Amino acid sequence: MKTKLSFLRLTFVASAFLLLPQFGSASSVLPLTTAEQVAASSAIFRGVVVGADCYRDASDGLIYTRTSLRVIEGFKGTFPTIVAVVHPGGTIGDITSYNGWSPRMKHGEVRLIFATRRPDGRLTGIQGAASAIKLAAPAEPTQETLLAEIRALTNNGQTLGDDVTDQTGFVTSDLTTGLSDRGGGIPARFVQADAGEPIIYLIDADNLPTGITLAQATNAVIQGVNAWSAVTSLKFKFGGVQSFGTNANAINSNDERLYIQLHDNYNTINSTNTLGIGGSYTSSSLIGGIWGAGGNVAGNEFFRSSSGNVVLERTNATMQNLATFTEVLCHEIGHAIGMAHSSQNPSEPNNTLKQSIMYYLVHGDGRGATLGTYDPPIIQQAYPTNNTPPYSYRRMMNVTTSSAGAPNVPGINELEVRGYDLQGTPLTMQTNGVGVGSSGTGSFSRSGNFIKFTPNGNWANPPIDPTDGSYYERIYARFSDGTNASAAAEVRVISHSTDSFPTVRDGIPNNWMTTYFGNSNPTAGPNRGATQDWDGDGLTNIDEYRTGMNPTNATSAQRITLITKNSIEFQAKAYELYELHASTNLTTWFRAANPLIPTTTTGTFADFTNTAPHMFFRVEKVP
């Protein structure tokens, strides 16, 4: 079985509210055992907070907060996809009621909820905050123990509970961020900045506003992207002028580029008073129902932007003014990288919101690509300047199977997932779980940063194209610096190959042996054993297999084949991970470039650090 990833176009809005504390109360509760909580609950579930609002109950005049959670796992009861729970306290206008009994749940948090019905039928925690337990993602060992206990007490979710599908919740954007909601209240971000790499932007200038030249239009785009890069960790790189052949917001390229169209030749904009639109394509799901594919910044999960787009209505006479044209560009680029409108109130009384570049009405006052005081702190929530999130790289695993049990050979069916950080902060790795894979062909385990896959049978599945997102089994890992977390690195099993020889399996598949030696049996000729070196190039046959080299060709030995002032070429195994290290004295080595995943058998490092008169380089294949 193989599965393929998909992407979905999402629309987005955002809003904000102000909390003004006025009065409060506190409470205490007696502890209950887990079994007592399970017995007392009408419904028990684990979910992610995706929405919240406050209301005043007409029956008692009190303020309540209604929190919506997307259900990840139901333990007791029958649930809608998003379920709402209510607790006393909240804010209506300029009055806030604080209730110490109630949980204070934030957008994106994972909570374990023990719920019961209120007299009005709504769900609430059986002990307020004590029954809305905040969980780490993934759950910490003690929390995993608690979850396992609940699964045992509820017969893995089979224990009857209330049907609470009538308590359907709702989704709101994270009301405190000002970033665009790309689905489920989660914003999105481009991840190139985490590795210090630029977003490539392309310009379609097939038509321009009357009176504006190509040079002026291109410079306006440069001013627009520079305004955002000046206050964030973002970098941009001009990729050229070209005709897109279609409307920019129809380009779902998954290449993480920004497509800027300076006209509306394809009639994307239908409103006569709309000067431009901006947006992006975004991964449409949470990993394991918890992790955003774009990483976590200061506790907020993000989807990953796979491409961005801007379309301008160049025929509107207003756009003939170069400063206004530049202002609209800057505004729409803001949308493409994750910003929502600061306000959509035509009579906005808050001057900070009104003077934002992200105010929904064009100012037309000659400001051009000038951000307001509102804009930098909002966009920095996605692209912080002082502590960028870590980053990592996907890995592909070709699994060796056997009828006599899984080969237990170092480097076979296992690989290392490495994390990197521009600030050099120590990192810790998390996975989204270990155990039986989604297709049931084996199980994952973890030791440190190494992921191992143990097949449960003598599977023989052909290689999958690494570029199309398919897999036989999959697990995710990501790295945390204590504040931020990297975009998740995917580890995909993309093939299963049988190993029948010798009696003690050596980890080299039969098909590889047959391809290079004409026979899958290593005893059929000299120097064909796993630890032997058939071509005498210094690599054992099993090392030739692991590195993607030809064991019958001594020139195929994972060598550097070309070096110039600005590039290094080397023999590679396609879709494996490589690092370039440099030294000035052969004693102290440092990483000279970001890691590389070649798509062919030739890898090329370019634009690496090369500032000393004499430099030594080495290429390392990450295990």
Image: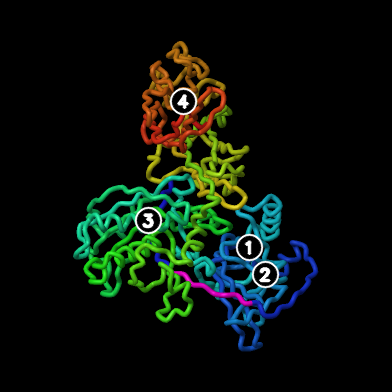
Q: Nearer the viewer, residue 487 or 136?
A: 487
Label 3 Cα neighbours within 10 Å, binned few <14 / some 14-19 / many ≥20: many
> Between marks 3 and 1, how big is the CA–CA gap?
39 Å
To which residue does mark 3 refer? 225
Q: Which of 96 and 30 is in front in this view?
A: 96
Q: Are marks 2 and 1 in contact (CB under 8 Å)?
A: yes
The disc labelled 1 sits on which kind of residue? Arg
Comes first in the chain, label 3 or label 2? 2
Q: Can residue 549 be seen in this view?
A: yes
Q: Can residue 81 be seen in this view?
A: no
At mark 3, the secondary structure is: helix
Foreground mark, 3 or 2, reads 3
> How far across and down, in percent of the image, does residue 163 sit?
59, 72
Comes first in the chain, label 4 or label 2? 2
Q: Do the residues labelled 3 and 4 touch (CB within 8 Å)?
A: no
Q: Is residue 162 magenta?
A: no
Label 2 Cα neighbours within 10 Å, binned few <14 / some 14-19 / many ≥20: many
At x 31%, y 65%, the residue is 323
Comes first in the chain, label 3 or label 1? 1
Q: Are marks 4 and 1 in contact (CB under 8 Å)?
A: no
